[in-house]
Image (cartoon, rainbow, N blue to C red):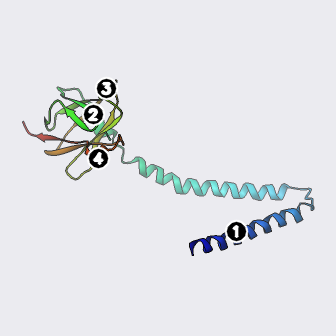
């Protein structure tokens, strides 16, 4: 049934293409000496299209730029006694040097991997991503974040790293002093 429809559709499309070819073939004999009106019309259409795109995509672009996480990350970068968490990714688990940190004080995650690339993502209780970096073998990425709410945060792997990728889950508790 589907094949029948596909075949009929192709037939229709092929006919249209054939007509197109025919049209061009017939008209190719006709010589237009002066292309200026055609050119003018093409330029008009082009500039209209350009401004339509600017009007449509410009606001969309600005809108998407409003919610950048740079402010939050800069807040986390302010100097202060950072609580350091060494985090190492393994197939398929996270090894953390500590699983408890204090709220409203910068935490410095030093993230690396013992085998292959992993993604280090910290999620709050609503499973919203709060911070992330990549866990790479032979390299340590520093991720600074200041937790502003108590709770249990989940650390999930964000990069497919093999059969048990989904098992790479860990937790970190954020509390008051
Ligand atoms: Cu580690 Cu996915």
* 3D distance between C-alphas at marks 3 and 2: 14 Å
Against 8, residue 163 (above or below) is: above
Eye-nearest disc, 3 or 4: 4
Q: Earlier in the sequence, mark 2 or mark 1?
A: 1
Q: Nearer the viewer, residue 68 or 11?
A: 11
Q: Say which residue appears at 47% left-offset and 54% top-offset.
A: 60
In the picture, residue 68 is in which quadrant? top left
Q: Secondary structure at mark 4?
A: helix
Judged left or right of residue 142, residue 66 is right
Judged left or right of residue 60, residue 7 is right
Q: Earlier in the sequence, mark 3 or mark 2?
A: 2
Residue denoted by label 4: 166
Residue denoted by label 2: 90
Q: Residues within 10 Å of mark 3 (few under 14, many from 20)?
A: some
Eye-nearest disc, 2 or 1: 2
Residue 80 coordinates in the image, percent (x, y): 19, 26
* 3D distance between C-alphas at marks 3 and 4: 23 Å
Q: Earlier in the sequence, mark 2 or mark 4?
A: 2
Tell me: is circle 4 under 8 Å from ligand 1.
Answer: yes
What's the mark number on residue 88? Answer: none
* 3D distance between C-alphas at marks 2 and 4: 12 Å
Residue denoted by label 1: 13
Q: Earlier in the sequence, mark 3 or mark 1?
A: 1
Residue denoted by label 3: 140
Q: Secondary structure at mark 3?
A: loop
Q: Ligand 1: which quarter?
A: top left
């Amino acid at each position: 049934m589907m094949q029948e429809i596909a075949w009929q559709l192709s037939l229709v499309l092929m006919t249209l293409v054939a007509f197109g070819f025919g049209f061009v073939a017939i008209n190719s004999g006709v010589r237009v000496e002066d292309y200026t009106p055609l050119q003018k019309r093409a330029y008009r259409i082009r500039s209209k299209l350009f401004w339509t795109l600017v009007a449509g995509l410009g606001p969309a672009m600005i809108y998407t730029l409003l919610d950048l996480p740079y402010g939050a990350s800069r807040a986390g970068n302010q100097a202060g006694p950072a609580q350091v968490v060494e985090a190492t990714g393994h197939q398929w688990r996270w090894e953390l040097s500590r699983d408890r940190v204090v709220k409203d004080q910068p935490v410095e995650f030093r993230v690396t991997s013992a085998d292959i690339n992993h993604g280090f993502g910290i999620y709050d209780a609503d499973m919203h991503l709060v911070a992330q970096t990549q866990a790479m073998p032979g390299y340590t990425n520093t991720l600074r974040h200041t937790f502003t709410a108590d709770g249990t945060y989940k650390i999930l792997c964000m990069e497919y790293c093999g059969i048990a990728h989904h098992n790479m889950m860990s937790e970190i508790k954020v509390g008051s002093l």
